[in-house]
Image: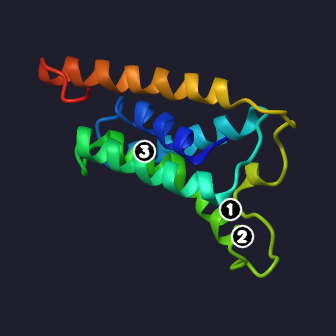
Amino acid sequence: MMSGVHAMLGAAVGSLCARRGVAFLAGLGTHVAGDLAPHKEYGAAAEVPLVAATLWWVGARCGWNSPAFWGALGGAAPDIENALDRFGLCDGAGPVFPTHRGWHGAARDEAVSQAALGVLCWALLRRRAVDKRGASPIE
């Protein structure tokens, strides 16, 4: 799954949490769930800008210390090892995060389903912002 989608899923679930630490752990859990679905990995040229933009967007819209942002960090954090591996910085040690060991099924191209999941998460974040503040800062 694309790291940006992992971050959005983590943000959506993290927004349901009251504390940042719990939100980060919930984000890690969403990473596991996302990795178990059949998916295709994309190159660093697509992944790095997408996850950076997603994290910036969540932080700017929800707050840098919000549970949503910490959930997004938790959702994206396990893919740091993928980035290190892609840049040849892992010394061939293999993946550490359990679902990065090839547990997911192969997929031809599920970019549309990932985009749909990202939009669904955005909608949840927007709804949560309205519920908590009475007016949505997310547009």
The residue indicated by pointer 2 is 85
Can you give x and y, in whole percent of width and height, for residue 94 in the image? 81, 69
Do the residues bearing badges 3 and 1 touch, measured as CB atoms within 8 Å?
no
73 sits to left or right of 95: left
The residue at 39%/20% (across/down) is 123
Label 2 – label 3 distance at C-alpha: 22 Å
Amino acid, disc 2 = Asp
Please, is residue 49 above or below residue 66 in the view?
A: below
Q: Quadrant of residue 43?
A: bottom right
Q: Quadrant of residue 44?
A: bottom right
Can you give x and y, in whole percent of width and height, for residue 86 in the image? 71, 68
139 sits to left or right of 8: left
Neighbour tally class for label 3: few under 14, some 14-19, many 20 plus, Cα within 10 Å? many
Can you give x and y, in whole percent of width and height, for residue 34 in the image? 65, 36
Give the mark, 2 or 3, whose residue is nearer the N terminus.
Answer: 3
Q: Is residue 92 visible?
A: yes
Label 3: state its secondary structure.
Answer: helix
State the scheme by which the image is colored.
rainbow
Give the mark, 3 or 1, whose residue is nearer the N terminus.
Answer: 3
The residue indicated by pointer 3 is 54
Neighbour tally class for label 1: few under 14, some 14-19, many 20 plus, Cα within 10 Å? many
Amino acid, disc 1 = Asn
